[in-house]
Amino acid sequence: MGAKTIMDLIDEAKIPCRTDPDLWFAESPQDVEFAKALCGGCPIQKACLARALEREEPWGVWGGELILRGTVVPRKRPRGRPRKHPVAA
């Protein structure tokens, strides 16, 4: 039998994005970070990210990275204006 394709892996594995796809397009920064963490053990993580960058996906978590306007960004900012002064921890 030949080498497995990405589609074979998707069909055989329990890929997190197949069970709750809305999480990968979440609005809250905490949910986005959770989705990115779930991608960590995915067998097609690298291929997913590469394909998303090729397609210039407009937004969402792909291959464990947050993509906005076709490029990887480190984290999702919360809605609203940034604070003028840092909050004491």
Image (cartoon, rainbow, N blue to C red):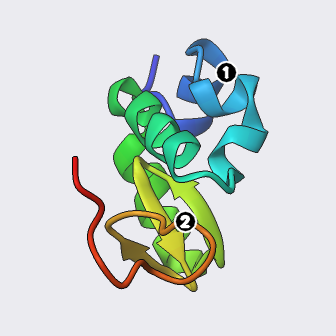
Camera-nearest label, 1 or 2: 2
Amino acid at circle 1: Asp
Q: Position of residue 57 (x, y in %)?
A: 62, 75
Residue name at image x 36 percent, y 85 percent: 84
Q: Is residue 3 visible?
A: no
Residue name at image x 26 percent, y 70 percent: 86
Residue name at image x 46 percent, y 16 percent: 1
Residue name at image x 68 percent, y 40 percent: 23
- Residue farthest toward the left in the current orientation of the protein: 89
Dot 1 falls on a residue whose secondary structure is helix
Q: Is residue 18 visible?
A: yes
Q: Position of residue 88 (x, y in %)?
A: 23, 55
Nearer-the-camera pick, 78 or 3: 78
Seen in the picture, residue 83 relative to 26 is either above or below; the reply is below
Is tag 1's residue or tag 2's residue first in the polypeptide sequence? 1
Quarter residue 2 falls in: top left
Please name the residue that numbered disc 2 is placed on: 78
Nearer-the-camera pick, 26 or 38: 26
**86 displayed left or right of 79:** left
Please name the residue that numbered disc 1 is placed on: 11
Q: Position of residue 6 (x, y in %)?
A: 53, 38
User: Dots 1 and 2: beta carbons under 8 Å?
Assistant: no
Q: Position of residue 81 (x, y in %)?
A: 54, 83
Q: CA distance from mark 1 to mark 2?
A: 35 Å
Quarter residue 31 falls in: top right
Seen in the picture, residue 5 relative to 79 is either above or below; the reply is above
Disc 2: CA contacts within 10 A as few (<14), some (14-19) or many (>=20): few
Seen in the picture, residue 11 relative to 54 is either above or below; the reply is above
Disc 1: CA contacts within 10 A as few (<14), some (14-19) or many (>=20): few
